[in-house]
Image: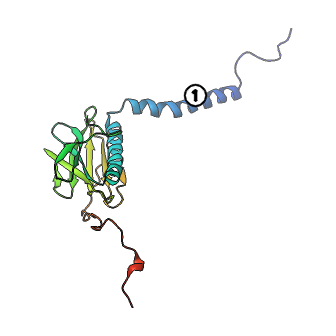
Amino acid sequence: MKKDREDGFTLLEIMVVLFLISLIAVIVVPRLSWRHSSGIKKSTRTLVREFRVLHWEAISRQEIIRLDYDLDHRRISASIIDPSGTIKSFQTLGVHDFTLSGKVRISLVNVLHEGKVSDGKTFTQFFPSGSVEPTRIFLEDSRGASLTIAVRPLSGRVRVMKGRVERKKMPPPFYGPPSGDLPSLDDTDEK
């Protein structure tokens, strides 16, 4: 008997197998390397989530809320300032006290009311008008990776950037008009 085909693989079969292996590697490898990261991404995600929740909590409650940083102990917590001026611990759905993960630390917090703070305690304030105290947070891990978290004062939007990104000048805060109503351009007194 004569064989129609020799034993072995064709070039097409080898190419299909290599393509499938490459596809699986492209999908799986980034996920595996992320799980074994130093924790800087996890800490950044947690901080960004806290910023977003506290921003909306300040607007909905019509009270000043703070995100407090204890740089020496790597602890983050939230507090609320009630109308009498008393500062109380604040926790709600999506907001809780936490310690930065792994070997991650905040190397510097740049806030408007204190400037650059690298040790001790400081905070970021969220106002009922929807504005947020301008803040930049510099996170580092033991392997030298660093991220910058920047909070825009008027919108409360949070931006995460790779590396240490400084801002030359902090913008002034916007607390909103005293009545809470934004003036329109139609209200001019021109006659």
The scheme the figure's colours follow is rainbow
The quadrant of the rendering that contains the N terminus is: top right
Q: In the image, what residue occupies the spot 30% across and 55% down?
A: 62
Relative height, residue 178 to residue 26 (above, below) = below
Nearer the observer, 75 or 109:
75
State the image quarter where residue 111 is shown: bottom left
Relative height, residue 109 to residue 19 (above, below) = below
Q: In the image, what residue occupies the spot 39% across and 79% down?
A: 187
Q: In the image, what residue occupies the spot 17% across and 58% down?
A: 113
Q: In the image, what residue occupies the spot 37% across and 82% down?
A: 188
Q: Is residue 157 left or right of residue 74?
A: right
How many marks overall? Answer: 1
Residue at the extreme right of the image, as rendered: 1
Residue on which disc 1 sits: 21
* Residue 19 visible, this orientation: yes
The quadrant of the rendering that contains the C terminus is: bottom left
State the image quarter where residue 115 is shown: bottom left
